[in-house]
Amino acid sequence: MENHNDSPESEQELSETGTELSAEDAQALSLRMEALLFVSAKPMSARRLSELLETGGSVIPIRQAAALVAERCHGHAYELKEFGGGYQLMTKPEYEEVVLLLQRQRKAQKLTPGALETLSVIAYKQPITRNELDGIRGVSSDHHIRTLSEHDLIKVVGRTESKGFGNAGAALYGTTNGFLNAFGLKTLSELPTSSDMNTANQAEASAEPSDEEE
């Protein structure tokens, strides 16, 4: 990944003089530019691109190459965006949802064992209060609840009945659509049942070699 500070800067820093590249040279330059933009997580200034692509400080080849990159983006899920003299390849708006799905899956894969245990209890026991959750786990779940909420895997789905004037009921937690997406489920009914898990555990145990076979 590009680690330089490539905040967009004005093309005015580059020379407006120079000649246009031949079609062949412009095509080659555009492919090199596309490779740089593909691995950059933020916009790259025309000045920085000129340095890396060695265009002699002229903005003309950069503009030529950028036009070809933008043209190649037609029919693809990404497009070339220009930000005040900087360029960046970005996912087209109509494909952002599928990118968010992948991001949620990656976040779910990074959960700690404690967070995964908390999520499992909520998924199977929802709606559930924090006290009920703590009672099942035997430890406080506050930190994991915050983490799972930040990852859009759980949310407050309601509250218990109030125990008096001015006292709001306890929050009830449940899973979100983000949870379903992250684990490849269409509905909660697709969660594995206890019998499914027992069958899987038995199959795993039978697959392990016994001491006699070793």
Image (spheres, grey):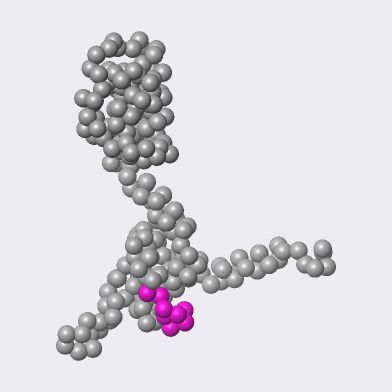
User: In the rendered image, which quarter is residue 81 located in?
Assistant: top left
Along the viewing direction, whichever of 202 and 107 lies nearer the viewer: 107
Q: State the image coordinates of residue 110 (x, y, percent, origin top left).
A: 46, 58
- Residue 138 inside the magenta-drawn segment: yes
Q: Is residue 58 above or below residue 152?
A: above
Of 157 and 45, nearer the camera is: 45
Q: Residue furthest bottom?
A: 164
Quadrant location, the N terminus: top left
Q: Is residue 96 above or below residue 176?
A: above
Q: Residue at x 39, y 26 (%)?
A: 52
Is 99 in front, or is 57? 57
Q: Quadrant of the C terminus?
A: bottom right
Q: Is residue 35 visible?
A: yes
Q: Residue at x 27, y 74 (%)?
A: 158
Above or below: residue 3 compared with residue 124: above
Residue occupying image coordinates x 34% and y 62%: 150
Q: Which residues are magenta?
A: 134-142
The residue lying toward the viewer, choosing from 84 and 17, is 17
Identify the residue shown where x is 40% and y is 75%: 141
Measured as percent of width and height from the top left, residue 78 is found at: 34, 35
The picture quadrant where one finds residue 136 is: bottom left
Q: Is residue 185 visible?
A: no
Q: How many marks?
A: 0
Query: Left of 67 or right of it: where is 165?
Result: left
Q: Is residue 33 magenta?
A: no
Coordinates of residue 188 in the picture (x, y in percent) = 41, 65
On the image, the x and y values in percent for residue 148 come to 38, 65
**Vertical position of residue 114 compared to residue 76: above or below:** below
